[in-house]
């Protein structure tokens, strides 16, 4: 499709001021069982599909494909990537394959937009790793912008990034929103504001919601996520409880409160998405709770929509077609990411990890490991070793 036709197609479907109550729905028996009554009642206004998580499936079942096509035909299907590893220092064949897969699914389904996670993945297996933070430098900015241009070029759709739940330090937390904005600027991209990820930051670093929201480009928020998670006690200091974005429990009351606060602050908002992993929906009681969470989210969205004022709509499309050149890389960053991944995945204790980091190339570098909060390094070890297993 020619670029001017892409732009015109988006102008044609811009209908202010609707916000759609949505769910993240993948090919997972437990998720689908929990969501089925909502789908049957026609309450789910849009679907978010993690299109790159079906690497294990030889063929998508016809009934699931039909479900996707139904929402695709109504301009209510959005694609959410998981495994691209946006800011890896080296451009890999797996990333190129990911883009080719994206092109393929975009020919099959019409996505209203495509999103990915911020950060880089630990682990050498492309589908097993943990998304962790990176230093906010000109090099990581250049690489992230390059990767987003490639995603935009591959899908010919609006492209966005999700804020990360994990940070090593309060300084990183405060810089995150601004860095996200700089990353998406070249593609005129948008932000997924994941409120549970924000909740993790608020708790783990004792920062206020009001302060943090002032540091995010709320005019670029097109999608909001809500979900649940879990608590983990620190071994170093049992008095400290770390909030983890594990997506395996009901949405906390505090996250619903954040949603109520955030809705009027995001003038370009189009989707609010409820997420939960299937491993947290094994019991009928958890499936009932999932549906109750959706209905509560739906109520907040509808209440907001009735009082929402029309905004000057941003198409979130580049002003001109993008033509990416040679992939941006940074060999030093690549080596440091490999070193960090290896330490996190193999260290037998916090003390060993800290000693290895202090004697590595990450010491006295832009990673600023000297300022990392001990309980967050401890958490990074736990995350990396869980994914490695």
Image (cartoon, helix red, strand yellow):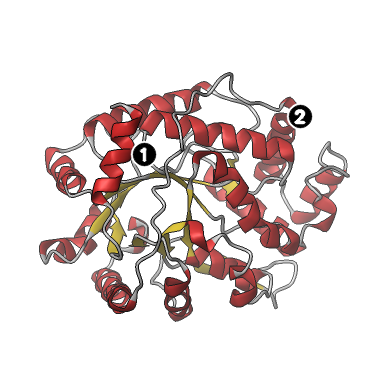
Q: Is residue 27 visible?
A: no
Q: Position of residue 347 (x, y in %)?
A: 72, 46
Q: Is residue 349 above or below residue 142?
A: below
Give the camera-side residue of 29 and 162.
162
Examine the rendering and report whether any part of residue 35 can be seen.
yes
Left or right, 242 with reference to 94? right
- Establish if 242 lies above or below 385: below
Give the mark nearest the N terminus, 2 or 1.
Answer: 1
Q: Residue at x 72, y 56 (%)?
A: 377
Residue drawn at (72%, 46%) of the image: 135
Categorize mark 1 by other alpha carbons within 10 Å: few (<14), some (14-19), many (20+).
Answer: many
Which numbered circle lies on residue 332?
A: 2
Q: Residue at x 40, y 29 (%)?
A: 154
Residue for badge 1: 157
Q: Quadrant of residue 270?
A: bottom left
Query: 366 and 247: which one is in front?
Result: 366
Q: Secondary structure at mark 2?
A: helix
Residue, x 26% and y 53% (percent of image)? 47
């Amino acid at each position: 499709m020619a670029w001017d036709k892409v732009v015109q197609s988006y102008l044609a479907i811009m209908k202010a001021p609707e916000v759609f109550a949505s769910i993240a729905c993948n090919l997972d028996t437990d998720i689908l069982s929990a969501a089925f009554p909502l789908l049957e009642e026609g309450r789910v206004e849009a679907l978010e599909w993690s299109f790159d998580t079906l690497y294990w499936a030889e063929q998508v079942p016809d009934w699931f494909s039909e479900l996707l096509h139904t929402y695709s035909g109504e301009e209510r299907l959005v694609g959410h990537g998981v495994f691209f590893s946006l800011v890896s220092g080296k451009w890999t064949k797996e990333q190129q394959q990911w883009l080719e897969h994206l092109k393929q699914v975009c020919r099959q389904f019409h996505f209203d937009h495509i999103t990915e996670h911020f950060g880089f993945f630990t682990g050498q297996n492309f589908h097993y790793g943990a998304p962790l933070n990176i230093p906010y430098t000109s090099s990581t900015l250049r690489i992230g912008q390059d990767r987003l241009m490639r995603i935009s070029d591959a899908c010919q759709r609006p492209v966005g990034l999700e804020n990360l739940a994990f940070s090593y330090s309060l300084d990183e937390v405060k810089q995150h929103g601004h860095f996200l904005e700089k990353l998406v600027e070249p593609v005129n991209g948008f932000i997924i504001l994941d409120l549970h990820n924000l909740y993790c930051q608020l708790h783990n670093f004792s920062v206020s919601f009001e302060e943090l929201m002032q540091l995010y480009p709320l005019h670029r928020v097109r999608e909001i996520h809500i979900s649940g998670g879990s608590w983990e006690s620190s071994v170093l200091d049992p008095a400290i409880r770390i909030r983890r974005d594990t997506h395996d429990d009901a949405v906390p009351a505090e996250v619903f409160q954040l949603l109520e606060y955030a809705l009027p602050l995001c003038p370009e908002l189009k989707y609010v998405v409820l997420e939960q992993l299937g491993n947290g929906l094994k019991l009928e009681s958890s499936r009932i709770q999932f549906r109750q969470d959706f209905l509560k989210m739906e109520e907040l969205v509808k209440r907001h929509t009735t009082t929402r004022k029309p905004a000057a709509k941003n198409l979130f499309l580049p002003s001109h077609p993008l033509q990416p050149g040679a992939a941006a890389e940074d060999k030093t960053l690549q080596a440091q990411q490999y070193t960090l991944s290896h330490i996190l995945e193999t260290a037998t204790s916090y003390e060993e990890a800290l000693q290895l980091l202090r004697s590595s190339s990450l010491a006295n570098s832009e990673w600023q490991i000297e300022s990392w909060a001990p309980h967050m390094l401890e958490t990074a070890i736990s995350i990396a070793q869980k994914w490695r297993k």
